[in-house]
Image (spheres, rainbow, N blue to C red):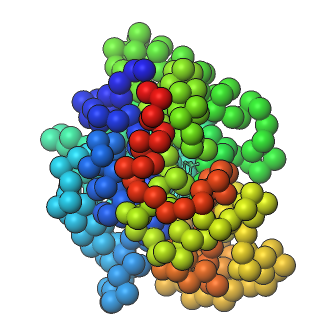
Amino acid sequence: MKSLNINGLIPKIPLIQGGMSVGISLDNLASAVANEGAIGIIGTAGIGLLDDNHVKNVKEANMEGLKKVIRKAREKTKGIIGVNIMTVLTDYKELVTTAIKEEIDLIISGAGLPLNLPSFLEETSKTKLVPIVSSLKAAQIIFKKWWNNYKYIPDAFVLEGPKAGGHLGYKKENLNKKEYQLEATLPQLVDFTEEIKKNYGKEVPVIAAGGIDTPEKVRQMFSLGASGIQVGTPFIATKECDADIKFKEALINAKEEDIVIIESPVGLPGRAIKNKFIEEVEAGIRKPFICNFHCIKTCNVFDAPYCIAQALLNAAKGNLDEGFVFTGQYGYKINKISTVKDVINYLFQEI
Ligand SMILES: Cc1cc2nc3c(=O)[nH]c(=O)nc-3n(C[C@H](O)[C@H](O)[C@H](O)COP(=O)(O)O)c2cc1C
């Protein structure tokens, strides 16, 4: 097994906990993962909405929320902590700048191509930049842009396959096709990073994500050339996860047939646990909302049948009548609350 080295960040365990917004991976989960020697990631979308008492405008609340959560995580661990910032967020630039000022160890950024991410680094910044991609082509575009415009080479790539949870970077009709699965795309991206190493002298690890929930799959990813894995769903049903217990129980109670693909107002497919809220939306029932902060660039506020940020926030707080739970494809296999330590020990038991 290769060791994971993200331009000098070397976790003891080559695992990144996938950033989970809104309110699922905050300081508690991220620090618990970091304390186990892996990399903990704070999900930043809607981070200011979690404070019920926020009176400021949402953008200011998000920046304050982000600072607060990073600082709380730092109090709980000396391990590696990063943030996940989706490029589709309207306050992307401010979130990135705030995280860099807080000296976050790494920024993981997907849901679109983070083409200008290096422009926010300052000369003294130590923050590493890791794009999430769903194909070799996306990685090549990012590499070319970053090199031409900033002479910056990504510090790693997360390659997220179609079995992941949350928003997915694939068309719905491609989700089950063989050529889009990690087994097919991972070796292609690994070859590309080997070319980068040969031509530019920089090691760019590839971290595989999406549906990696057994020791066998972990081993398979490493044998296909991954230097690390990113795991989301298995950490939801842990004691340390920041979501309400009802959110965790919804995952524990889900059956295979409950895990469905939805069309999110963000304009991407998403994988979620079917419930009454999702059924009603699918039946054409609109969930009226007031949008006082256009949080997602691609959200058409006037056509959206519901507010995704509000729905995810409601779910994170345990109000599943007015929201729903995002999950990876194999979320139905989880049937009890465990701990971060248990999840990591299980996944790496063979290695
Ligand atoms: C509840 C939930 C929320 C998520 N939120 C985000 C997010 O805010 N940004 C992002 O890039 N990925 C997000 N993801 C994807 C995860 O970070 C991770 O890459 C993915 O879930 C890996 O697949 P797995 O869940 O099968 O392990 C989310 C996933 C879940 C299940």
What percent of the width, then of the height, locates residue 27?
31, 63
Say left or right for 45 vs 62: right
Q: Is residue 309 left or right of residue 126?
A: right
Q: Dividing the image into 4 quarters, which one contains the N terminus? A: top left
Q: Quadrant of residue 326?
A: bottom right
Which quadrant holds residue 73? bottom left
Quadrant location of the C terminus? top left
Work out whether 48 lies above or below 145.
Answer: below
Residue 190 visible: no
Q: Is residue 61 above or below residue 216?
A: below
Relative to 47, 71 lies left or right? left
> Which residue in the rendered view is the most extreme toward the right?
283
| Residue at image location 62% in from the left, 40% down from the top | 161
Which is more toward the observer, 291 or 66? Answer: 66
Q: Residue furthest top?
A: 198
Name the residue located 17 percent from the left edge and 61 percent from the top edge. Answer: 75
Viewer-proximal residue, 9 or 127?
9
**Which residue is nearer to you in this view: 249 or 100?**
249
Q: Position of residue 62 (x, y in %)?
A: 35, 72
Percent of width and height locating residue 10: 27, 32
Q: Does residue 141 lie above or below 58 as drawn?
A: above
Give me the residue at 26% from left, 49% from top: 35
- Count every numbered label the image shows and give the total: 0
Q: Residue at x 36, y 60 (%)?
A: 29
Q: Quadrant of residue 254?
A: bottom right
Please indicate, yes or no, whether residue 58 appears anywhere in the rendered image.
yes
